[in-house]
Image: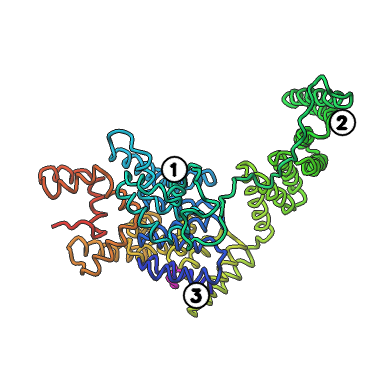
Amino acid sequence: MADEAKAKGNAAFSAGDFNHAVAHFTDAISLAPTNHVLYSNRSAAYASLAKFPEALSDAHKTIELKPDWGKGYSRLGAAYVGLHSYGDAVSAYNKGLQIDPTNEALKSGLADAESALARSSRSRGGPAPNPFGEAFGTDMWVKLASDPDTREFLQHQDFVKMMQDIQKNPNNVNSHMKDQRVMQALGVLLNLKIQTTGAEDGEGIPPSASGPEKKRPAAEAPKEEKRPEKDPEPEVGELDEEEKEKRIKKSEAQKEKEAGNAAYKKKDFEMAIQHYTKAVDLDDEDISFLTNRAAVYLEMSKYEDCIKDCEKAVERGRELRSDYKMIARALTRKGSALVKMAKCSKDYETAIEAFQKALTEHRNPDTLKKLNDAEKAKKDLEQQEYFNPQIADEEREKGNQFFKEQKYPEAIKHYTEAIKRNPKDPRVYSNRAASYTKLGAMPEGLKDAEKCIELDPTFSKGYTRKGAVQFFMKEYEKALETYQEGLKHDPQNQELLDGVKRCMEQINKANRGDLSPEELKERQAKAMQDPEIQNILTDPVMRQVLVDFQENPKAAQDHMKNPLVMNKIQKLVSAGIVQVR
């Protein structure tokens, strides 16, 4: 049921009906509240309706559910851009690229956000702005709503009026400083910890805030426990013999560690093991000796010895309340050894579990990458074991039968199974694309058609499927390009030729100005969601070209000699943005 609601939402989104898209995605979320994709899709729909606070909320939920998914950060960046919070947008896109460095959408979004940030800075001009004025900018309400302490103040009408007054004129902030809520809000907006008076007794907070005071929790390192305070140590001259001996051993242990490090760098692993072992014997309170020895065992392919040292380091570290980063390092090293062993045992689960535990101690990017690699290796192994071309053909035939009976969801189910059994068969992606198109799930259909073309660029069906989806999405220029690309491989294909004809009819209809007001409005709304159209309209050169077409006929004639410019003009004409008389 959730997939059905999602498909309806995707279809509505593709048709530009964003209100219904939101409704369908909301239905899907009620059925599958932990599906991060649904929140991502609804965020995109909200953004298309210019409801950016809602888009921001859904983007945050997407990342909460799937923090290692690049698209979540893309949604977050888009929402921040819509709220004109360009600095936050840049930060969101950068975080996404740390997880998915090759993601083109994140790269493009980052470039746009950085350009917008630069334009915003230039437009202000003059001397550096007053920090209070910056604090009460367009993203003020987003920051206040995001903070757990100030969020509830937004329910107080008098507080909202005061903040609106300050936003209109930041100089008015002085007249409201006596209100503790304003002081607290200023601290959030300036990212400062401002000491407020009377907070313990609720001074300045009306009864509607109610309940005990909610103090902002201090930032804590995950799983870190504070060591009990020790009595002041005596001066060196006052140390007893036992303490002196302990300090001497610790010093000797550090020297052994340094010797072990030097041997490790020279790849003299046996000597490194000897030094680290001496260090462990001299001082069993420093678990770095164990993790270092484990690293040597890992290099020597002595994986069981490596795992044994890592487990001992974790156990001893918890007893001594060692630095959580050291415990995370031990767990990560254990996971690395388990991955090496999994190449023979085919058991990646224990490695994945070790990496996950390490991340609960310290969210290290290197550990996260190792986890992702282990999960991918596990998935690839499962796929290899599941691979069976014969069963794939049987499932494809079952899907074909359901397609003929117009039972498209059932057809998709069998095509999906066929893909799992043989993910390299372009025919199955083509067939599933056709089924998605029949259900109005255009994004899914487009993705399958593109995969079909990727697997076999000479397979005509891939181009007819992709062109059909683009045509239904009213992207006639793109559909035309797809059909023409297909004709390069199969010049006499009638489906491709018919597709070109249909696209040209729609494009010429726009050129002649024969679109009805409803068609024009629909086409323009659709076009404004297209990044390519957006780039054309925001290009300073193209803006000047459009002005020349209206005001400077001679310059317009010169522009028409440039094929690149005319190609962009044609795209705007087809989109109904520009009319040629």
Residue 408 marker = 3
Q: Nearer the viewer, mark 2 or mark 3?
A: 2
**Is any part of residue 303 visible from this angle?**
no
Query: Above or below — where is 305 with respect to 428?
Result: above
Residue at (35%, 57%) from the top-left corner?
A: 161
Report the amino acid beneath label 2. Answer: Asp
Report the amino acid beneath label 1. Answer: Leu
Q: Relative to 430, is 298 on the left or the right?
A: right
Which comes sooner in the sequence, label 1 or label 2?
A: 1
- Residue found at the very far bottom of the displayed protein: 405
Report the amino acid beneath label 3. Answer: Tyr
Residue 281 marker = 2
Q: Residues within 10 Å of mark 2 (few under 14, many from 20)?
A: few
192 or 30, nearer to the observer: 192
Element type at marker 2? helix
Q: CA distance from mark 2 to mark 3?
A: 68 Å
Residue 395 in percent (x, y) is at 59, 70
Residue 256 in percent (x, y) is at 80, 24
Q: Residues within 10 Å of mark 3 (few under 14, many from 20)?
A: many
Q: Say if the magenta span includes residue 447.
A: no
Residue 394 in percent (x, y) is at 61, 70
508 or 495, nearer to the observer: 508
Q: CA distance from mark 1 to mark 3?
A: 54 Å
Residues marked 2 and 3 touching at CB (< 8 Å): no
Q: Nearer the viewer, mark 1 or mark 2?
A: 1
Quarter where residue 19 is shown: bottom left
Q: CA distance from mark 1 to mark 2?
A: 52 Å
Residue 190 marker = 1
Residue 396 in percent (x, y) is at 56, 69
The magenta stretch is 436-441
